[in-house]
Amino acid sequence: MSARPAAEVDAPGQEPAIVPVHVGVIMDGNGRWATSRRLPRVEGHRRGVEALRRCVRAAREIGIRYLTIYSFSSENWSRPVSEVSELMGLLRFFLRYDLAELHRMGVRVKVIGARAGLAPDIGNLFDEAEALTRDNGGLTLVVAFNYGSRQEIAAAVASIAADAAAGSIRPEEVSVEMISQRLATAGIPDPDLIVRTSGEQRLSNFLLWQAAYAEFVFLPIYWPDFDKAALLSAIDEYARRDRRFGGVTGRFNP
């Protein structure tokens, strides 16, 4: 199993006894957080960046090895142009001003999602972030930007089909492992836990293939209110699940 056991911890405020290796986070509710406070939606996105900083620090402190954040989906382009522009500005700000701190903390940054058509400076910032942090051995922060899981799977299948048409592989050789290695997350373990804020209970085209055996925790708080306590509460819920991976026995029934 992919969760790593640690010493049992019962005292409140301490780290959990079981820490998932890979956590995916759907950061949802920025706009509703702002609307509920009669603030502009962009203020919710600004506060969401602060929540992201808290989440990264908390994941590193807890001992999570991979944190994948759903920062911008391929469907988010349908939002109002002004809101998309604000989101792009916040992304630029985060990468320019937080990258040095991430590097200092030993965080490795990896960006997944389509880069074609992005503003050149954003693509350059992604390249810079990945190059600067490539050799870091701490937390790997996977930024899913302009990402859609269906599109990712379709691209993987198209790549395999092209090889089959060229005669380099036979159809019967296609396997789960082969498809996994053609995804943007190749080399990264599948998520153990996926957390979504705002109370919504859906994946919204996020890591559909990779989440086959993930545990899901849906928190009723909006993303700008997310902090270490919220992450710990999700991990505590995860630790109570009996993960059987399709079998009969699970974590608590060896």
Image: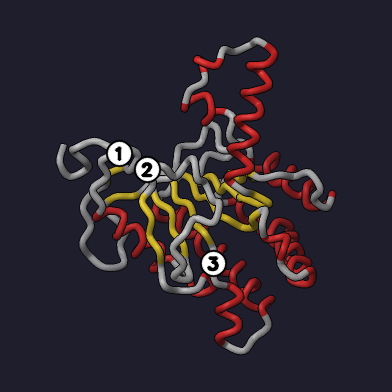
Looking at the picture, which amino acid does disc 2 mark? Tyr
Nearer the observer, 133 or 174: 174
Disc 2 designates what residue?
213
| Left or right for 70, reference 196 | right
Q: Residue at x 66, y 45 (%)?
A: 113
Label 3 or label 2, whichever comes before in sequence order: 3
Amino acid type of the residue tagged 1 in the rendering = Phe
Q: CA distance from mark 3 to mark 1?
A: 28 Å
Q: Which residue occupies 65% across, 10% down?
A: 167
Percent x, y for residue 76?
67, 61
- Say if mark 1 contacts mark 2, CB within 8 Å: yes
Residue most extreme to the left: 253
- Is residue 97 visible from the viewing direction of this image? no
- Please report whichever mark, 3 or 1, sits nearer to the chain's N-terminal start: 3
The correct choice, above or below, for 37 with respect to 234 in the image is below
Q: Which residue is label 3 attached to?
A: 28
**For residue 191, which quarter of the picture?**
top left
In the image: residue 140, left or right of residue 17: right
**Dot 1 corresponds to which residue?**
245
Question: Disc 3 vs disc 1: Cβ atoms closer than 8 Å?
Answer: no
Mark 3 falls on what kind of element?
loop
